[in-house]
Amino acid sequence: MILEPCCYKQYISTLLESKYESYHLFTNGDVDLSMIMDQLIGHSPGCDVYLVLINVHLNTIRTIERLMNGMIPSTEQYLIRSLTIVTQGEDRKIISQYLSQFRKEGRLKVLEDNVAFRCLCVGNGENNFVLQGSIPQEKNYSMQMMTFTKSKKLYDNVMSILHGKKN
């Protein structure tokens, strides 16, 4: 499936309602991580998020800040209950500059590791998603490929590996 700026919201909704659990997604670099995060987190309110990135761009940090401050309508729950960012570590200063309030609240953890891949895990127990691959953080207009799954088993497998990195 090719995600395009005009229709990506509809495509993601279709993926989430489909009977199939996994998809290969393509973009021409004009649908970025922020756009995808908005959609997946909107379908999984009150979620825990794991974000693995080689480096974190300012555009992504601003999206995280907005979503971390977002509330579920008619509740006192945040859209994102907790967020763990795994990155190479050079981004610690910019992450602290924009997201330190969430660390103080205990809702944000930043882990440093030698990562060479990109992955977004979003789950609230009812809806659980994993997106991995060449996820552009900013529009770059080059072809990108990602794998998306809503399989609870695959989500749990990925999360067990990521949780193991904490120790």
Image (spheres, grey):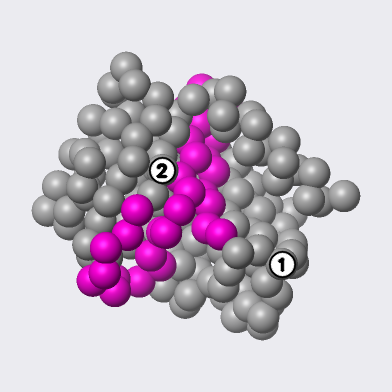
10 in relation to 95, above or below: above
Q: Visible in this render: residue 66?
A: no
Which residue appears at 80% of the width and 44% of the height? Answer: 164
Earlier-in-chain disc, 2 versus 1 = 1
x, y percent for residue 54: 58, 69
Kind of residue sitting beneath label 2: Thr
Highlighted magenta segment, given as a residue range: 117-145
**Residue 114: which numbered mark, if any?**
1
Residue 57: within the magenta? no
Q: In this image, 56 relative to 5: left or right?
A: right
Disc 2 to disc 1, C-alpha distance: 22 Å
Q: Residue beneath label 2, please?
A: 147
Q: Name the foreground residue: 66 vs 27.
A: 27
* Residue at the far left in the pictured view: 6
Residue 119: within the magenta? yes
Element assignment for label 2? strand
Which residue appears at 14% of the width and 47% of the height? Answer: 7
Q: Name the foreground residue: 145 vs 138.
A: 145
Element assignment for label 1? loop
**Residue 82: which numbered mark, if any?**
none
Which residue appears at 54% of the width and 43% of the height? Answer: 121
x, y percent for residue 78: 53, 44
